[in-house]
Amino acid sequence: MTIKKPKFKLRPKKASKLHRKMGQAPGTVTYMGQREGVETVVSVINYDENEFNVIQTNSLEKIKEFKDSKQTSWVDVTGISDEGYIDSLGKMFELNSLVLEDVVNPQQRPKIDEYEDYIFGVFKMLYIDENQEIVSEHIAIILYQNSVLVFQELKDDVFNAVRDRVKNKSGRVRTRGADYLFFALLDAVVDNYFVVLEHLNSRIEALEEEVYDNPNSEVAHRIQDLKKDVLKVRRNVAPMKELIGRLEDTENKLVTKDTKLFLRDVKDHCIEINESLQIYREMSMSLMEMYMSNMSNKMNEVMKVLTIMASIFIPLTFIVGVYGMNFDNIPELHYEYGYPMVWGVMILMFIAMLVYFKRKKWL
Amino acid sequence: MTIKKPKFKLRPKKASKLHRKMGQAPGTVTYMGQREGVETVVSVINYDENEFNVIQTNSLEKIKEFKDSKQTSWVDVTGISDEGYIDSLGKMFELNSLVLEDVVNPQQRPKIDEYEDYIFGVFKMLYIDENQEIVSEHIAIILYQNSVLVFQELKDDVFNAVRDRVKNKSGRVRTRGADYLFFALLDAVVDNYFVVLEHLNSRIEALEEEVYDNPNSEVAHRIQDLKKDVLKVRRNVAPMKELIGRLEDTENKLVTKDTKLFLRDVKDHCIEINESLQIYREMSMSLMEMYMSNMSNKMNEVMKVLTIMASIFIPLTFIVGVYGMNFDNIPELHYEYGYPMVWGVMILMFIAMLVYFKRKKWL
Amino acid sequence: MTIKKPKFKLRPKKASKLHRKMGQAPGTVTYMGQREGVETVVSVINYDENEFNVIQTNSLEKIKEFKDSKQTSWVDVTGISDEGYIDSLGKMFELNSLVLEDVVNPQQRPKIDEYEDYIFGVFKMLYIDENQEIVSEHIAIILYQNSVLVFQELKDDVFNAVRDRVKNKSGRVRTRGADYLFFALLDAVVDNYFVVLEHLNSRIEALEEEVYDNPNSEVAHRIQDLKKDVLKVRRNVAPMKELIGRLEDTENKLVTKDTKLFLRDVKDHCIEINESLQIYREMSMSLMEMYMSNMSNKMNEVMKVLTIMASIFIPLTFIVGVYGMNFDNIPELHYEYGYPMVWGVMILMFIAMLVYFKRKKWL
Amino acid sequence: MTIKKPKFKLRPKKASKLHRKMGQAPGTVTYMGQREGVETVVSVINYDENEFNVIQTNSLEKIKEFKDSKQTSWVDVTGISDEGYIDSLGKMFELNSLVLEDVVNPQQRPKIDEYEDYIFGVFKMLYIDENQEIVSEHIAIILYQNSVLVFQELKDDVFNAVRDRVKNKSGRVRTRGADYLFFALLDAVVDNYFVVLEHLNSRIEALEEEVYDNPNSEVAHRIQDLKKDVLKVRRNVAPMKELIGRLEDTENKLVTKDTKLFLRDVKDHCIEINESLQIYREMSMSLMEMYMSNMSNKMNEVMKVLTIMASIFIPLTFIVGVYGMNFDNIPELHYEYGYPMVWGVMILMFIAMLVYFKRKKWL
Amino acid sequence: MTIKKPKFKLRPKKASKLHRKMGQAPGTVTYMGQREGVETVVSVINYDENEFNVIQTNSLEKIKEFKDSKQTSWVDVTGISDEGYIDSLGKMFELNSLVLEDVVNPQQRPKIDEYEDYIFGVFKMLYIDENQEIVSEHIAIILYQNSVLVFQELKDDVFNAVRDRVKNKSGRVRTRGADYLFFALLDAVVDNYFVVLEHLNSRIEALEEEVYDNPNSEVAHRIQDLKKDVLKVRRNVAPMKELIGRLEDTENKLVTKDTKLFLRDVKDHCIEINESLQIYREMSMSLMEMYMSNMSNKMNEVMKVLTIMASIFIPLTFIVGVYGMNFDNIPELHYEYGYPMVWGVMILMFIAMLVYFKRKKWL
């Protein structure tokens, strides 16, 4: 599931973007992300129990045809930086200008808004890219009576499995309406969060070992990076539970009772993910604590070596200094066994210190 | 109550599992755990006030017979990795496909969902295994009008006491219906949590002593392990209170008013367990704090030894160095009592330092 | 108010107890505490506006007589480890088996349950024992139309003042019914919590001084003990506010409107106690913080002494070492004033170091 | 606004008080504070749009006259330790015995209780005394249809501005009823909290500077004192928002709609104060963090000095030691330039060490 | 977007201000800020679909004319320290005295109050000034049926883009009423918060690098400043979400359904900002943690250097001391190869120590 994507960014709107945006009226369609130049491609999957068609077209008329057909249509728009095209597409689909503004704003947090004729949702797909970094992709899904309109920033997505299920004539998705498709897409997005959790989990496990084996500042750095990533994932995932819960309770007739049962299942997954993130958060705090305690341990060890060396040899050095003095009259110097006696004393002191440190369990 | 079980795992779905699962439609029966190869065995206990039968059979027809009888049946399925069999059993019991998905998914967090004809609950049995590790076992219990269907991952369980009570003709469980059996099973699961609490508690007590006697990095390690285990247990136990509370308030006619009184009792136990876990959590944080403070104390002690040794002998070494100099003209060297005088000065300095450190309470 | 009691225990059910209990049906009367062998004694106080009788009897018939009389009866049962007697008494009072289970379970957290004919409450009396430790005693109070049934683990209690007020003919308690007596007992329990708070408060004050005067590891130990005691007390007191609040709002006719006004007063006390505990908690965390900061201060001081001693004498020792060398040709050695000049240089260096350390404010 | 008051106390009821109180029935009028011997003085301000009278009297009859008049009366009772007088006054004003108990209990937390004929409030006046300590004064305000009854522990108060506004014939307070006076008094109490906030704020600012300039253990002590004071103030102020909010929503006819508008304003102030206290709390935690980090910095500096001195001179001392040895046969000693060569080597080593430490940025 | 403004202040009311204010009745118009002497200037923009006029006037009559016209008027008052003028203007606009008090009180936290004829809001504009400090400016916006009255402390504001949109004949703002203008102003205020977030974000990124490269006490200082700034911004922004949410749900006819849709959009922005602030808060705590851990690392490094130097040379110095002794009878001194043998021993010891430290990974 590791997909090549640009690096994850969580910054608020870039200054350059901001200046472009800030003088404008709300509801203006301005792409606020950093993935410009992605070609806008529209593919439409049109199906019912018996038929199944896929076409790729940017022609608004053709798309409209599909939209108006009685079959279920999945209109998938890849690349949202072509503001003009998005705008006309949005108008054709009778989207509110505020909705269109959100469609092209990757900074928009997850949300679900119900309008009279459609339900509008913003979600975040999360991937692990080739550099093992977590990448976020903005996605907007709009549910109509007979069609689902999907906007995504990049070509790669997590929907291939859903496409396969739609192709498969005996799949449940073929017999149920657009709302089941909407749910299936949402389910695919949420399922992929588990991959990200797995990635976080393996990083925690790796760090747990390194904190013991080799606690250096690079490990501390990686713990902090982990904490930041957990924060980032939580930001994108945390609102999901409530959003889906609201959809489960909605009286909007676009969502059938059957689909609500499935939505409850997705909500359960979201709760589980949030709990895991909470646990990862506490674990990363424990890791940092452990790191600090290991640092402290190492310091203690260093200090002990110094203290033992100094405590043993400083007094001995003093003694040899005494008999290095040049006084005319140091009687010991002239004893026949003076020298070995001094050695004896020093060896005794040495042993005494060793015993002392042994007792203190420093050795 | 120590039962041989594989080690407790809290990881999100394994990558290998994930890839198998992620392309599938929701509601697909895929075993998501790590205890494959456990043979699926079904035993049925069938009883009313007067009769009591136990049989062991995998035949769906026989099971159906029991299910449809007017007597209360307890169908106990051990081993859930045989997806095909579970699927057909589920269909016979008219279980929703989403329910079946949860039955075979040990990652599913505790939950209780009410359906028209049955109440479906997922719980976690917790054991202490032979390595003194906490083991979690996934369990699903489904309450019907006249029967209770239990799925468990492994053969060992905490239900032997319930089996004995069912066997015992004068037991209350014999005269009450399936919902009382459902409660009794739930009660057995929750009662066993106290064993786990006891285990955690004794670990805290052991660590409390070691933190004082012998604060080394292995103790810190074990404190962190304790924190993780408290987190893990909390994850499995925390949702129980709310779930049972919801059951207590349900208007579902499967749960009689009498049984609700007993459910309130179980809920009280869950609240008590959650409170204990909260206290264990705070205690384990205190332990870590205490550990850090003892480390700091030890460092202080080490530093004091070094400082005392160095402060006493470094000046003395300087003095003996002075009289080791080879100047032609050092008058003191030729004093008759030069040598003893220097000793006198040094002893005075030694005593002065001792007094100084005594006053500072470093000795 | 210091009463001799066994030590405070907060452990979950003891293993030995657990094994005895775990195989049993819920509602079984099994004493779960650790104060076995306390003789069960029943004393009945029977009063109305005019009459007042106290008798001590274990005869169920006599107790029943009092219970059925129109006067208010206070049946006080001391010692709850005689399970058989408690069981028959409970049956005479028509107590639910789950209630009886709670009566003899000192691990039961505080609770108030309303039944058709009675209100059942479990509370915790807290004392300071002779070793200045906090002792908890399990107590169950059951309110009937005309009588109050009290179960307590031990003979000592906090109800003497209430007994005096009942004896006193002009006391308000004589003219009001059983519900006022129930409130008076609850009030006595809660009032005694203030004694425990006072005890905690004086420990905090003592520790505040010691943390400054003499921060050693025993002080850290006592701070952690304080934190644990605050946790323990909170555990017993925290649920009270909500329980009494629920009683205040009950529509149960056993509790008159007048008594509810008094209950509000008790609830206010509980809120006050909880707030104090919250503040004690924060204070004990501050104490630990202060302890760590004082430890750090002390370490700094130790290090400064070492650094000053070493920084002054190590260079001087080097200089005297230089002139202790045995080179044939060290011109300074033969200068007439070589020795005093070296002293001069060393004294200058000494003063320079002193000035340097003075400037750094290390001296 | 600095007023002479005894020191702020936050302790629970004193033991001596407790013993006196604990045997009593609830609703007994016993002064529970520590400011005994304050003479009880009653002053009555009686006014309407046209008239204005102030008298000072302890005569219950006179006070009753004012209370019963159609004009608005402000009965201000200073000194609440004369329990007998307070009791009779309370009875004249038909106060519930539980209310009277609260009136004379300075430990009572802020509260507002509504009774049929009056609204009873307990608040805390906070001052900064001459020792720059925060002093709390218990105050009880009771609102009747036409009069406001105020009990305060001490003579000093924050109501002078309100008195002036009542005296001033054109003031709004003259034309509005007792409920506006009640609000004005409450407003004066809350306004004075800002003085306390200002005091806390200036302490924080002073500490911020000292933590950088001179981080010693006295500063840590003062930070902890600050934290305690923030806790204490919060305890007295935090309940106010909810209390006033409840009064704003009351349907009690004693509070007119106009006055509710003003109450909303006071509530806004309370929210602001609580937010400031929250920020002060976080700031004091940051201060402590900063203190610890500065301590750590200082330790690092001390260690660096030691390490530099020792690392430079210990090897040099070893070298001079070498040439102080008395071997018969040390060829270097007899080199013509042996001595300057050794100096050269030592100077090179010295420079090398300096460069090394410079590179490590320790110098 | 960097605008010259005086420095950000978060202090409670200044003492001098307080004394002036505290004796006054509530509802008195007293400027409570610190930007006195800003000239009060009123500019009125008057427009409908076809017309557009801007005039600058302080004449109350002229302003009244505009207010009463059927066209939409935007009355923009700059400078609020001229209390008299503000008072008369307020009276002309029939503002409640409590509202006027808030208008001139920059300490007032954000709020929205609904009155019968108008909706009153207090907000905070936040800028980055030329010293890269965050500046807060108090702003009050009042919405009438046909006009919007804006009070701002200073001339600079964030409304230029709104002015341009009003000027532009084809802008949506021209065709919609006063409530849309109110929303547009609010939207401009909130949009500018993103600039402040960007500023905070870039500070965090800069600090993240410095904490690794150069962790000195100035960096710690800046981290604490960052934390304080995040607190300050949060204080001004946090209430916005709830305030706008309340406006979204209002039944006040001043706010049309269309505008509510836009308000929901602003609320979404506020939620996003609050989330970012929450993340910044956690990041700044992580920064401090990282700083402490790097400090600890550096200390360890310093200690290692000291320990290595001392452990290597202290024993060697002892050895050379031994052979510096003047005993008559030290046989080794007279060995032919005594001197090189000692060197050999010392070199071996040196190598042994190096190996030892290498093994410990200290080198």
Image: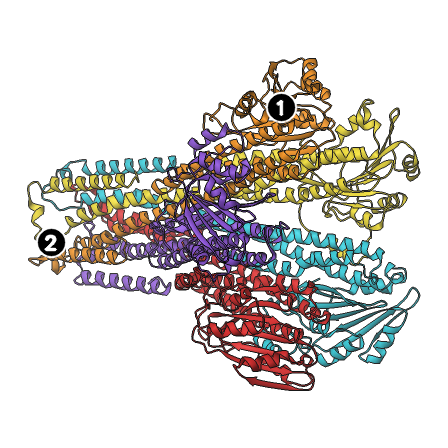
Chain colours: A red, B cyan, C yellow, D orange, E purple
Q: Residue D110: x, y in percent? A: 62, 33
| Vertical placement of residue B196 versus A42, above or below | above
Q: Nearer the viewer, residue E25 or C50?
A: E25
Residue C120 sits in which quadrant?
A: top right
- Which chain hosts label 2? C
Q: Residue C7: x, y in percent? A: 66, 41
- Which chain hosts label 1? D
Disc 1 crowd rating (10 Å Cα; few below 14, some 14-19, many 20+) is many
Q: Nearer the viewer, residue D85 or D260?
A: D260
Instruction: Name the element at disc 1.
Output: strand
Q: Residue C161: x, y in percent? A: 75, 28
Give the Cα distance between marks 2 and 1.
94 Å
Residue that label 2 marks: C327
Q: Name which residue type carries label 2.
A: Phe
Indicate which disc residue D151 carries: 1
Disc 2 crowd rating (10 Å Cα; few below 14, some 14-19, many 20+) is many
Left or right: residue D167 versus residue B252 is: left
- Same chain, marks 2 and 1? no
| Vertical placement of residue D222 versus B242, above or below | above
Q: Which residue is at a point 26% across and 41% down the rendered structure image?
A: C357
